[in-house]
Image (cartoon, rainbow, N blue to C red):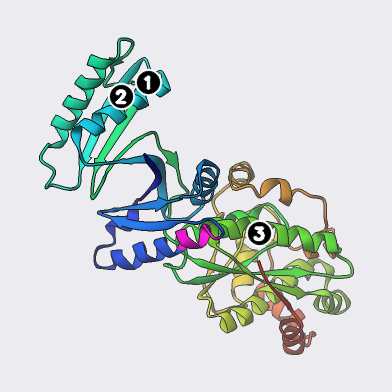
């Protein structure tokens, strides 16, 4: 008896003539996620099967990893048996007995149309055999304790139950984006949501060392590592804003410091995006949450760049964002009390309705291009 993992994909199957591109990318990402685990991957009539010969512990670790691969809707641990109805019946009976199920239901799918018994008849015969051989179980077609699934493909597979995957589209099928990754709750969630739509992510983090600590830097690296489990790896660009923030504080009104700093961050990110061939910037802004996230502030911020800016959290409130952060395992890291560059030089009364002409006037007192170039050229790049 051989146990495998049956992988199901959802909207990938709707991609028409591009379907093979999406499936092949998903297979590649599955292989990448199983690095260090001996495995083989089989494509079989609209399903992907993963063989893990290393025993039950390796199989369970593989399931854990695959649940975080974008593009996988659900998966099941399945038993492979010969395409022989008597053997299928026996294995189904063993499954009912091992689970000590009081009620059961049988469902089947016959992808191999050459198999001589049709799906309804498979269900009828297997169910009748279980009832004949077991005294303590009965059929319940509406709410069974155990749902036995039989799939007839190149081999026959039997399983009970599904484990939910992350869904979405395979990473790498939606182009590349550059995530502005802070140490807070929002931006990791924003990155996760965009990556779920197939976007391959790189990330840029802005710090103000020595005003921000090494612990704050490590916190962001740890957040990137959590995201990398879903995305298959992230290149993280660490950029110092210390000189830029110092220049803003010396030459510009204090209430404009947040929006001015934000515009510099966007322009630096756009410069890095051009180098990395990213097609969009991704931020964790939620409309109205803080001073830099009012509609007026967002419009002024966006005017500093030409690239599109994706804000997947724009219509979410903080409770919704926190729930999602907990679900993807970033929340506990995000609330660690280490400072970031935005809090170090925060004005007591930041401008909430900035006017672009006034912001441009203040920027005219800054040597923007040398400051941006120096920040980009001196950045540290980490492969997470």
* Image quadrant where one finds the C terminus: bottom right
Rendering coords of residue 295 (x, y %): 60, 61
Residue 27 within the segment the image draws in magenta = no
- Residue at numbered disc 1: 97
Q: Nearer the viewer, residue 153 or 379?
A: 153
Write the start and end of the magenta stretch as one range: 29-35
Mark 3 Cα shell of 10 Å, populated few (<14), some (14-19), many (≥20): some
Q: Is residue 287 visible?
A: no
Compute the Cα span from label 1 to label 2.
Answer: 6 Å
Q: Nearer the viewer, mark 2 or mark 3?
A: 2
Task: Give left or right: position of 347 versus 327.
Answer: right
Please tell me the numbered disc located at residue 93: 2
Crowding near the residue tagged with mark 1, few <14, some 14–19, many ≥20 C-alpha atoms within 10 Å: some
Q: Secondary structure at mark 3?
A: helix
Label number found at residue 14: none
Instruction: Judge from the rendering whether residue 88 lies leftward or rightward of residue 49; answer left or right.
Output: left
Q: Main secondary structure of the magenta part?
A: helix
In the rendered view, would you say 59 is above or below 237? above
Task: Check whether the beta carbons of the residues at disc 3 and disc 1 lie within 8 A of each other.
Answer: no
Q: Residue at x 41, y 51 (%)?
A: 51
Indicate which disc residue 225 carries.
3
């Amino acid at each position: 008896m051989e146990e495998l993992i049956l992988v199901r994909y959802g909207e990938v199957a709707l991609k028409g003539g591009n379907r093979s591109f999406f499936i092949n990318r998903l297979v590649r990402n599955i292989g990448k996620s199983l690095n260090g685990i001996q495995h083989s991957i089989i494509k079989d009539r609209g399903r992907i099967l993963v063989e893990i010969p290393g025993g039950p512990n390796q199989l369970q670790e593989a399931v854990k990893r695959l649940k975080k691969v974008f593009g996988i809707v659900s998966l099941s641990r399945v038993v492979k048996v010969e395409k022989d109805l008597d053997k299928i019946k026996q294995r189904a009976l063993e499954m009912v007995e091992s689970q000590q199920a009081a009620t059961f239901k049988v469902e089947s799918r016959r992808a191999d149309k050459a198999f001589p018994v049709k799906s309804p008849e498979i269900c009828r015969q297997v169910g009748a055999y279980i009832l004949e051989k077991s005294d303590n179980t009965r059929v319940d077609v509406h709410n069974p304790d155990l749902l036995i699934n039989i799939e007839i493909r190149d081999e026959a597979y039997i399983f009970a139950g599904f484990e939910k995957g992350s869904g979405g589209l395979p990473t790498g099928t939606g182009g590349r984006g550059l995530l502005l990754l802070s140490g807070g709750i929002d931006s990791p969630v924003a990155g996760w949501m965009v990556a779920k739509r197939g976007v391959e992510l790189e990330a840029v983090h802005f710090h103000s060392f020595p005003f921000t600590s090494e612990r704050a830097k490590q916190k962001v690296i740890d957040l990137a590592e959590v995201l990398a489990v879903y995305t298959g790896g992230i290149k993280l660009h660490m950029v110092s804003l210390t000189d830029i923030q110092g220049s803003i504080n010396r030459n510009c009104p204090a209430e404009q410091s947040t929006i001015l700093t934000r515009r510099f961050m966007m322009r630096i990110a756009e410069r890095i995006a051009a180098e990395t061939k990213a097609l969009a910037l991704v931020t964790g802004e939620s409309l109205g949450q803080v001073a830099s996230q009012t509609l007026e502030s967002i419009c002024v911020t966006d005017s500093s760049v030409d690239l599109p800016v994706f804000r997947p959290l724009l219509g979410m409130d903080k409770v919704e964002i926190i729930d999602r952060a907990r679900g993807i395992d970033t929340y506990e890291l995000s609330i660690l009390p280490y400072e970031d560059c935005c809090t170090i030089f925060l004005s007591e009364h930041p401008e909430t309705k900035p006017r672009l002409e006034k912001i441009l006037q203040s920027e005219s007192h800054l040597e923007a291009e040398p400051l941006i170039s120096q920040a980009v050229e001196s950045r540290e790049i980490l492969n997470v």
